Image: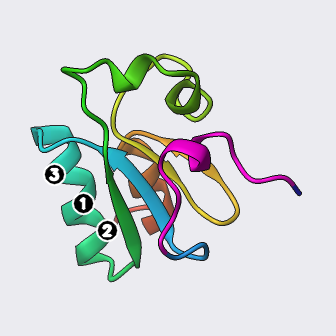
Amino acid sequence: MSKPLIYERWPPLHADWIQLYSINSPNGIKVAVALEEMKLDYDPHLVNIREGDQHTAEFRSVSPNAKIPALISAHHQLSGIAHIGAREGPREN
């Protein structure tokens, strides 16, 4: 299996960890906090939206709509916080 295009610009520090591509924004922080609370290992990568990083081919290879945050795990490509909740399973009311 070939490595994802995004790894050319933002190489993972730990290939078996979740890769978080984001900025210090409310949505980016929500994802990081969720990963921390679930005790999941992740490598954070800064996507500088002021410089247009979100529009590069590398970033759009994992987030075609150029939206942050985006995540890659060793097995799945994810986009947004909704996918974090999916990992937790259904909630009891």
Give left or right: position of 63 versus 37.
Answer: right
Q: Which residue is mark 2?
A: 35
User: Residue at the spot x=51%, y=74% of the render?
Assistant: 17
Asked if marks 2 and 3 touch (Cβ < 8 Å), the reply is no
Local packing at callout 2 (Cα closer than 10 Å; few below 14, some 14-19, many 20+) is some
Q: Which residue is mark 1?
A: 32
As drawn, the residue found furthest toward the right would be 1
Residue 39 drawn above or below residue 9: below
Q: Amino acid at mark 3?
A: Ile
Q: Amino acid at mark 2?
A: Leu
Find numbered disc 3 in the image and state the secondary structure of the residue it sits on: helix
Local packing at callout 3 (Cα closer than 10 Å; few below 14, some 14-19, many 20+) is some
- The magenta stretch is 2-13
C-alpha distance separating marks 1 and 3: 5 Å
The question of residue 91 being in magenta is answered with: no
Find numbered disc 1 in the image and state the secondary structure of the residue it sits on: helix
Figure quadrant of the C terminus: bottom left
User: Residue at the spot x=18%, y=20% of the render?
Assistant: 50
Figure quadrant of the N terminus: bottom right
Q: Amino acid at mark 1?
A: Ala
Q: Nearer the viewer, residue 74 or 37?
A: 74
Q: Which residue is mark 3?
A: 29
